[in-house]
Image (tube, helix red, strand yellow):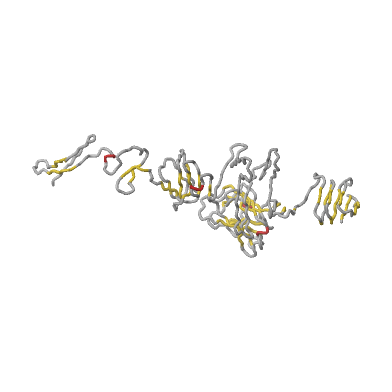
Amino acid sequence: MKKYVLLFVVIGLISLTGAVVIDISNPGEDNGRVINLDIGKIISDFLDLLDTPTSYSGAGGDCVVVNSGETGLTFGNCTNSTEVAGSGNLSWNETRGDLIHQPLEDQRLSTTNNVTFTGLNITNSSGTLAFYIDENGKIGINTNPALFIDIFTVTGNMDLIHTAENSDDHALEIDVDAAGFGDVKALDINYITGAISTGEDEGIILININELAATGGEVFGVEVLSTEGSAEVFGFKVGPLIGPIHQDSGVFINPTTATNNTVSTDISAMLDGSSGTNTTIFETDNSYILIGNIAPSQDIELVISTGASGAGIMPTFQYSTSGSHQFTTFTPVDGTNGFRNTGIVSWDDSDLVSHTTNDDTSTFDIKIIRTRNNLAIPPVLDFAKTASTVEYIWDKDGNLLVNSINANSWGNVTITESQVTDLSHTVDTNLSLGGTIDGNITMSNDTKTFYGSENQAEIYWNGTVLVIKVS
């Protein structure tokens, strides 16, 4: 058997033109073999290739890519994708090109280094533009870039999350100079109710206050301050057909029923009113909790130590009707944002038609169901409480339904209605009546003066106070 050894040793870079002859022979024999190689040039530089660019100029930082015609190589943007599947967060430190992150729940994109964009497009899985920053720093979310040249436009939901680091801090500040113009709004809300019906409540501006850690102080849901000036400033104004005030008066108490995905088995940690014990709830899709009491409630306080991840549990709310575990769906105002934070779930008693006790628990129950398919972190509930409330209203016609009015410091009180019935009032100062009174007015101080529009009165002493009966 003949053996041939071919040894190439290349030292340095060789550039040749013409024919190269390599003689391969078997030692000791005269049957030499000759291989003719016609080599135009031995390549010493990438640019010497026939299907590549002729210069590096202007291509700093670019990558070698196949050209659009798929006939050669060229320089271009580094478009190799980094694709991340599965759950969890993604740390982006040194990644060039497109970053493809699968649209799963509860993921975040973080970076330990600075990321600089001269323009940024983020598209969703269908290729539709979802987030855009142009070269001037204008931002658009789920909108066409042409629509946000002068404004910041968001189509969809937006969460602003802020933790204060010092006093006099703010999560959102709006500075507006009306510059002498009229009809200038710092905040303009265009709200469309759609076809809501009985059992559906909506809070256009919801302020959910968690004061569990407070030991004192004062919290104002809305505070309006003004300097001196010649304008007539009001803290609050409503238009026609709007009732200015609707108050639910009551206190929170421990519920009688609190179950975790069971028909009637109570969980003591859910109803003990203590943050020292807690319960993980809504661990699976369509799981539920029951919160109930022996009297109908209109509010539920839910103290949550660990909030649901992502967009929350997407809750469905139901109330008990006649029978065993029979419920009807309604839509309260959810201050927990889908069990992502401690908050109040609130509704009106009139929202719940035919609300009665559940045969399984013998209490007026509210059922809350998780409908979110994927949830990486379920909420953890410290406890729940319920409140049976009394409604007090200042309605759209100006009528007041209140518990009591203390007029001790008012000075003169004037009643201008043509007729007021069933009035019992303790008077420490002058009372001026512009109409007809049918009822008793009790004067705790007989030195005060009574003025009536009609000179008909019955005055007598009942042994304790002076009574004036006007008719």
Is 140 in front, or is 300?
A: 140
Is 220 in front, or is 67?
A: 67
In this view of the protein, can residue 461 be seen by the observer? yes
Residue 214, horizontal then vertical, whole percent: 66, 42
Residue visible at 66% across and 45% down?
222
Is residue 159 depicted above or below 367 in this figure? above
Residue 402, horizontal then vertical, whole percent: 75, 52
Is residue 297 depicted above or below 55 in this figure? below
Residue visible at 89% across and 50% down?
466
Judge from the rendering whether residue 46 lies leftward or rightward of residue 467; answer left or right.
left
Residue 424, horizontal then vertical, whole percent: 83, 53
Is 445 in front, or is 419?
A: 419
Judge from the rendering whether residue 462 lies leftward or rightward of residue 90; answer left or right.
right
Furthest residue to the front?
Answer: 181
Furthest residue to the left?
Answer: 30
Residue visible at 22% across and 39% down?
42
Is 139 in front, or is 100?
A: 139
Q: In the rendered view of the protein, which quadrant contains the C terminus?
A: bottom right
